[in-house]
């Protein structure tokens, strides 16, 4: 009995079989925000690569800046300066693909053999273009000096500062000479950049005022890319925070390459104050745009203000896409993935939250579920509001009409109005834009899975055709690497669609297809699905069937496995039937054990190879080694057979259970019936969370299971739609009923004492606090709880051998 507590010592650490690797922080396992979000309206729809990263995702500032069109604009300005003699591609090669030292070697030696076929290099090396060649050499040398500063970990700044000073003096000399305006602006930009990086210990002048004077004289008000790039440095040189924010705001608007950096430095309070400072329509609009991008909640009113002022505003697609992605997160993330839309680390528990009340007792957090439902209803109402405003925009013009139609169609799908979604999708004109074609296909698939008979072969073929189209079009599917389902939005769109599709097949009652699609999705949902790994015998292969299936579904799966001439869709999902037949039969037999159909379970186990349990999964570690009818050290005296099983096998164990049932059925005397009933109660006890045979009933367990919190994605919890099975496993309900039956039957004091001892244990560890928690499914220890069964045991049976054996156990004391 002293070992009674051994299993509860495990509560201090999670006991997980087939667990997935966890990303951990100091507070426990967690997922990145994008991993708990569902987003199927693709950020590519914005139509601007430089803005895509500012969508509704926590990763946008971590993904690095996009140069967007800036490099193309620079190359085009150079092409114009060469009067079209150099191609944009060749200019790009020299500007951005040629390392500075390579170019400088050619410049210093006159050996241009590496540039034989380059039209820009050919143009630069003509005598009449000497000034342009000289500028390019200076620019490459400055680039080399900056690279040297960044790459040399031993550089203390002096060397680079000296180089900057030399470069500044050379550039100012150039600016004082007669030059083409094109080159003068580029020299000015180089000068602005060099002054910005000048080391203060080397320079004897005020670099801010110098930078401002250069920019004001040569670049301010110019409609060129170097003027836009230089404005970032100009902003940082400003004497006040207001002016700095103003020019950062303009930099964000005018430069793709500097957009990311400018946004990071824009001060929120400073942007707010600009609303009363700026005087031009363009600046006022940019203030509203930045404030809208930085709005994590509903922003339709702000979007409406921008649209009213400028119906063709280039930022409207970004802002609308963000709003749609918010609605997806608020509505679809909980519905499809099971995660709370609240972007909060470790906020993965479902609606059955528990909390401590003021007096310290545990109780249901009913407010959580109430407000979750209330917010969902508000979010759906807001969805309609957004949709109606997009219809208004479509009717009054301004924004891209195809973009608006697809936006409205997507929201219609979210709202369950699939006919409207199809109607708007059919109005999308052919543009040749692949991103539009992909979005149309995504929404057609969503509509199809909710309206067509997807259980019919024709419906399955349509589903398969759309999935293949999306795959071939490059719609992302997260790779599975090292146990992590890790990628950013929108790289998991196919994964998310497969989860949605799985839910639709489950709604149709097709558990086999639903399970295989969920396996193929390989994405985190808020339920435990195990760790895929490289082994075919892994819990992933059983998880969905274990949670949602029946023995009939296992039969259907095996029949499907053996089916010849599978259709294309069937071949697509059949790839997931990777485990051997014995593993699926093991699950079928385990399901029968949960239903107490032990004889039928034995029939199934007899079809499995005798070596299966010893060689696979975690059976060898966790299946009981000793007789299933004994509770071992919970009752220290000799009770029935004490045999050890010859090898690891569910088959051998269930043979003993069937023998006990047969002995009970054939028992003649009352005491024999009581004794066999007690042995069967021990079997039921051993098949619980706290019993030695728990793996006969479940494929894993964790301390979370004992506490009844739905922390599902990381911890194995036995979950069943049948509450009686849950009570049998976690609350010892079946064992207690059988112990009571034995107690009411026997007249033997020792057996009565043993029944009371086990009833007290089951009562204490299987449900005492659950009864106090107003219906919360809680399973766990209450150290302060005094079971009435223990009290009866202590008051009436102190002269029994059972009492003598148990008296050393602290909880019995």
Image (cartoon, rainbow, N blue to C red):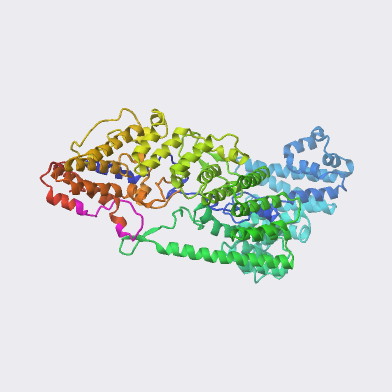
Give 129 or 669, whichever is nearer the viewer. Answer: 669
Residue 775 lies within the magenta run: yes
Can residue 641 be seen? yes
Left or right of 282: which side holds 614?
left
The boundaries of the magenta stretch are 771-789
Give 242 or 511, whichever is nearer the viewer. Answer: 511
Residue 713 pos. (x, y %) = 46, 48
Residue displayed at 17% across by 43% down? 670
Left or right of 718: which side holds 386?
right
Can residue 20 be seen? no
Residue 477 pos. (x, y %) = 60, 44
* Secondary structure mainly formed by the magenta segment: loop
Give 87 or 335, whichever is nearer the viewer. Answer: 335
Where is the N terminus found, in terms of image quarters?
top left
Q: How many marks?
A: 0
Residue 212 pos. (x, y %) = 71, 59
Residue 740 pos. (x, y %) = 22, 49
């Amino acid at each position: 009995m002293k070992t009674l507590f051994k299993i509860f010592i495990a509560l201090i650490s999670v006991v997980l079989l087939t667990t997935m690797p966890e990303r951990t922080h100091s507070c426990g396992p967690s997922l990145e925000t994008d991993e708990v979000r569902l987003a199927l309206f693709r950020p590519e729809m914005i139509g601007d690569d430089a803005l895509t990263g500012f969508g509704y995702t926590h990763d946008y500032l971590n993904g690095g800046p996009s140069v967007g069109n800036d490099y193309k604009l620079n190359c085009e300005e150079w092409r114009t300066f060469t009067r079209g003699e150099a191609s944009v591609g060749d200019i790009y090669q020299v500007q951005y693909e040629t390392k500075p030292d390579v170019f400088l070697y050619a410049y210093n030696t006159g050996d241009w053999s590496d540039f034989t076929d380059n039209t820009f290099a050919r143009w630069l090396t003509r005598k009449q273009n000497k000034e342009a060649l000289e500028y390019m050499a200076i620019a490459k040398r400055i680039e080399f000096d900056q690279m040297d500063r960044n790459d040399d970990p031993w550089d203390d700044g002096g060397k680079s500062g000296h180089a900057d000073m030399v470069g500044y003096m050379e550039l100012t000399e150039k600016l004082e000479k007669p030059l083409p305006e094109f080159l003068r602006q580029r020299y000015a930009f180089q000068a602005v950049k060099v002054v910005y990086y000048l080391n203060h210990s080397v320079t004897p002048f005020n670099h801010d005022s110098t930078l401002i004077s250069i920019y004001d004289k040569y670049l301010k008000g110019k409609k060129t890319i170097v003027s836009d790039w230089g404005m970032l440095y100009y902003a940082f040189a400003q004497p006040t925070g207001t002016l700095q924010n103003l020019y950062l705001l303009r930099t964000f608007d005018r430069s793709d390459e500097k957009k990311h950096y400018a946004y990071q430095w824009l001060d929120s309070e400073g942007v707010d104050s600009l609303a009363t400072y700026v005087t031009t329509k363009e600046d006022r609009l940019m203030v509203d745009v930045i404030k809208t991008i930085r709005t994590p909640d509903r922003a339709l009113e702000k979007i409406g203000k921008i649209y009213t002022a400028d119906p063709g505003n280039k930022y409207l697609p970004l802002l609308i896409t963000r709003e749609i992605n918010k609605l997806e997160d608020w509505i679809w993330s909980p519905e499809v993935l099971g995660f709370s839309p609240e972007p909060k680390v470790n906020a993965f528990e479902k609606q059955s939250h528990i909390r401590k009340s003021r007096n310290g007792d545990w109780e249901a957090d009913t407010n959580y579920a109430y407000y979750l439902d209330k917010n969902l209803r508000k979010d759906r109402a807001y969805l309609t509001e957004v949709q109606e405003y997009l219809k208004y925009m479509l009717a009054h013009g301004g924004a891209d009409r195809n973009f608006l139609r697809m936006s409205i169609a997507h929201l219609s799908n979210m709202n369950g109005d699939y006919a409207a979604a199809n109607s708007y999708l059919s109005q999308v004109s052919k543009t040749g834009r692949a991103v539009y074609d992909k979005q149309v296909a995504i929404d057609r698939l969503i509509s199809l899975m909710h309206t067509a008979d997807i259980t019919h072969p024709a419906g399955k073929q349509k589903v398969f055709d759309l999935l293949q189209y999306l795959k071939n079009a490059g719609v992302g599917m997260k790779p599975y690497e090292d146990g992590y389902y890790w990628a950013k939005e929108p790289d998991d769109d196919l994964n998310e669609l497969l989860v949605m599709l799985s839910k639709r097949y489950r709604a149709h009652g097709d558990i086999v297809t639903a399970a295989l699609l969920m396996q193929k999705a390989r994405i985190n949902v808020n339920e435990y699905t195990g760790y895929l790994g490289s082994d075919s015998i892994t819990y992933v292969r059983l998880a969905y069937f274990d949670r949602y299936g029946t023995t009939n579904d296992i039969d259907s799966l095996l029949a499907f496995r053996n089916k010849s001439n599978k259709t294309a869709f069937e071949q697509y999902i059949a790839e997931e039937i990777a485990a051997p037949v014995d593993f699926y039969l093991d699950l079928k037999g385990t399901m029968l054990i949960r239903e107490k159909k032990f004889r039928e379970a034995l029939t199934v186990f007899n079809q499995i190879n005798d070596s299966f349990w010893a060689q696979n999964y975690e059976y060898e570690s966790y299946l009981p080694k000793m007789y299933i009818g004994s509770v071992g050290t919970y009752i220290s005296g000799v009770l029935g057979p004490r045999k050890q099983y010859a090898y690891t096998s569910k088959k051998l164990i269930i043979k003993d259970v069937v023998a006990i049932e047969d002995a009970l059925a054939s028992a003649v005397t009352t005491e024999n019936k009581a004794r066999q009933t007690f042995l069967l109660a021990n079997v039921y006890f051993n098949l619980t969370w706290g019993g030695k045979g728990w793996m006969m009933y479940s494929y894993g367990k964790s301390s979370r299971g004992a506490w009844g919190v739905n922390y599902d994605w990381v911890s194995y919890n036995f979950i069943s739609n049948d509450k009686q099975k849950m009570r049998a496993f976690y609350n010892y309900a079946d064992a207690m009923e059988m112990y009571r039956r034995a107690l009411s039957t026997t007249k033997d004091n020792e057996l009565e004492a043993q029944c009371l001892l086990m009833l007290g244990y089951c009562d204490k560890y299987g449900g005492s606090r659950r009864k106090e928690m107003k219906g919360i499914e809680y399973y766990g220890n209450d150290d302060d709880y005094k079971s009435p069964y223990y009290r009866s045991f202590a008051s009436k049976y102190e002269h029994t051998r059972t009492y003598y054996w148990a008296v050393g156990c602290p909880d019995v004391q």
